[in-house]
Image (tube, rainbow, N blue to C red):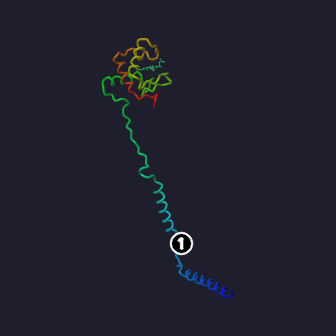
Amino acid sequence: MARLIYFLAFIVGLVLVMNISSYQKNTVSNEKFDFQKVADMNAKKEKEIEELMKPKKEEVAEVKVVKAGPLVELTTPELQNGHDIYKAKCIVCHGKRGEGKAGQKAPSIGGQYDWYIKTQVANMKSGVRVNKVMNPYIARLSDQDISDLAQYVSKLPYMGRK
Ligand code: HEC
């Protein structure tokens, strides 16, 4: 029993001595707390975080620049004539893109088949189809004008289906 107690006392002593010696190895610093240094370190960390938060290059959505070109390329004299008449006589009710205007009760006609537009306007002119509001605008159009208009309007972006 006594031996066991001696042995335990020896172990405890050994642990104490080891602890004290390691304690002496601790370097004691009298350096003052350097606020500037810490502030600099923080700033550096913040910058690092900022860098990490930035989206990677691949992730940046490409901004496509879409040039707002003319609605219809006026490549022929017929299209040019159709455009001129449309602008002067039809745009007020049917809109720039042929999208129509509810306020005028004017339907969307942009992108409609050219043969349909031609037939309808011709029928309105001859009185087969009665359209009193449009009549003054089409009364003096020639067959060529109506055909050119139909060509132009059929090429306008169809607003009914986006
Ligand atoms: C004063 C307004 C007005 C002007 C200007 C006008 N329209 Fe119309 N247009 C209408 C209305 C309203 C209707 C619908 C008629 C109906 O209910 O039958 C219509 C219908 C049409 C239709 C038939 C659409 C369909 O689906 O059947 C065509 C094609 C058309 N217009 C072409 C023209 C063209 C081309 C011009 C220029 C020369 C023109 N419009 C100028 C008011 C107008």
Could you tell me which residue is drawn at 40 percent across and 42 percent down? 64
Residue 137 rendering spot, x and y as whole percentages = 41, 17
Position of residue 37 in the picture relative to residue 119 (left or right): right
Position of residue 74 in the picture relative to residue 111 (left or right): left
Q: Which amino acid does label 1 sit on?
A: Phe
- Which residue position holds label 1? 33
* Residue 137 versus residue 29 in the image, above or below: above
User: Around disc 1, counting alpha carbons within 10 Å, would you say few (fewer than 14), some (14 to 19), or many (20 or more)?
Assistant: few
User: CB of residue at label 1: within 8 Å of ligand 1?
Assistant: no
Residue 101 rendering spot, x and y as whole percentages = 48, 25
Residue 71 rendering spot, x and y as whole percentages = 38, 30
Residue 86 rendering spot, x and y as whole percentages = 39, 23
Q: In which quarter of the image is residue 72?
A: top left
Where is ligand 1, by quadrant? top left
Could you tell me which residue is drawn at 51 percent across and 67 percent down? 38
Q: What element carries label 1?
A: loop
* Residue 17 versus residue 159 in the image, above or below: below
Q: Which of 56 and 101 is in front in this view?
A: 56
